[in-house]
Amino acid sequence: MEKTIVARTGNEAMAEAMRQINPDVCAAYPITPATEIMQIFSSFVNDGLVNTNLITVESEHSAMSACVGSAAAGARTMTATSSQGLIYMHEILFIAASLRLPIVMADVNRAISGPINIHCDHSDTMAERDSGWIQIFSENSQEAYDNMIQAIRIAERKDVSLPAMVTTDGFIISHGMERLETYPDAEVKKFIGEYNPPYNVLNLEKPITVGSIVLTDYYLEHKKAQHEAMKNAKKAILDIGKEFGKVFGKEYGFFEEYKTSDADYVLVCLGSTAGTTKAAIEELRQEGIKCGLIKIRMFRPFPAEELAAALKKCKGIVVLDRSEAMNTQAGPVATEIKAALYDAGIAKPMHNYIYGLGGREIYIEDIKNVFRNISKDTKGSNEVKYLGLKEA
Amino acid sequence: MSTKPNIKGWKDLNVGGVVESGTSEHFHTGDWRSKVPVWQEKNCIQCMNCWAFCPDHAIKVKDGKRAEYDYAYCKGCGVCAEECPKTTIAINAVKKDDPNAKIDSFDGAKNPTFAEKAAILMVSLKDAKEKFGVK
Ligand code: SF4
Ligand code: SF4
């Protein structure tokens, strides 16, 4: 297959994926740093490069509501947002998931107010982690592009039928220009295939009611059905990641392991910090510290068993959390990892750091230090530490 | 109230919990009615307002004409009486279980004349049920 090598920002890469996906409907409202995605996409609409019906709405709450309506009418539906926009969609996100509508969203990670801030952290996505959406994180523009294409297939697979959000780190990826390999339009079109919606409220041949009230009698069963669909999503993510590898040359799974096979210390993180960590690992290995990285790609559903198995051999674990859970016990990622290890009967030293909130820079030296710290500690610590904090 | 009989467990739910049309057939809203409308066929001008406005399917149509109530689906909301141009003549409502029930014209402002009032039968729910064969 002939790939085209271009220089693209994360937002440009996501908009390009959307052009190739050519959804029936997009409903969106602009918000920094995701604005560009829809801005670029709206030029595609204007220039006739897509057949999409673009709905410019008055808020993100309306954007997600329009997406739900459009998806329920059998249209392949996409949107893009960030931060306040995502949490303004909050109530409708749960409805989209419970209605099992395979809407795909580009979510550019940005801190949640307050204090008001426009820079990267993962608090927006983490605030929606229980909404029933599939959540896929990307390290760079290439992954953002690849993940968008795969998310369509994962979300739409019949035994899944759930909405999915693909995230990038605000500004760091969204506005950082990188090398991107794009695939021919025809190949992407073939990979995603024809859309066969779960149902269509506008089908007069088979009239249905969507969103009816479910009280004490069947609400519980409804959630169980969602739970099972999420389990099926795990399988779908693996299958489709493999198939993607066969077609486009890069296979995807639940997480990426980097130099873990002989690693004494493994750091777990999401998104762009994985790139910084890889550089730190290279340098530390020169110093003789055998360290590795696990970069979680799929946060929802959470690959608990697989992560526990991957962390089994190492002597110590560092978990970096780019958002706060405010439980004073662990950040959102560390909470999940701890639960996964508990279930697998694994107890080993772990350090959990909150870092990079509100776009605070993370340096290779910071990462080297956290590895050095865990390599000197045999007991671990329950204290949630803040990395790069100004103490005085 | 009855639910759709073939839903037993979570595996039987349609994706997204969508339901096929016409399930209101399974719900007898008449179960919780506290007032009952009574139709006086002789005063009816067949405008079909009541049929169009009834929020359930309590008003039956036969040969293109308004027919008797199906009380199984009548919740006693009074919309039909409100929308009937011959309110209190063609449709009136009676409070449940009150043998001396006064006419309740729902909007209370139609001011029926004494003759009209007399024309409206002071039927009790029991009588109405008997008259219309409702169990
Ligand atoms: S009272 Fe209400 S439910 Fe009963 S027939 Fe009249 S409009 Fe229909
Ligand atoms: S609204 Fe009144 S007059 Fe019209 S069809 Fe119904 S009962 Fe008869």
Image: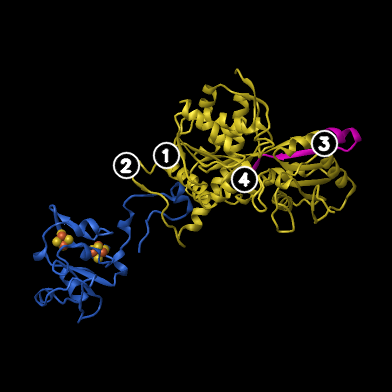
Q: Quick one: label 2, few (<14), some, or many (20+) residues within 10 Å? A: few
Q: How many marks?
A: 4
Q: Are marks 3 and 2 on the same chain?
A: yes
Residue type at the position of mark 4: Arg
Q: Which mark is residue A74?
A: 1
**Residue at figure coordinates x 53%, y 43% from the top left:** A163
Q: Specify the quarter for ligand 1.
A: bottom left
Q: Is residue B18 left or right of residue A174?
A: left
Q: Secondary structure at mark 2?
A: loop
Residue on which disc 2 sits: A204
* Mark in the foreground, 3 or 2: 3
Sooner in the amino-acid sequence: mark 2 or mark 4: 2
Q: Are the residues under badges 4 and 3 in a single subunit?
A: yes
Residue toward you, A256 or A51? A51
Q: Residue at x 36, y 42 (%)?
A: A202
Per the rendering, the colour in which chain A appears is yellow
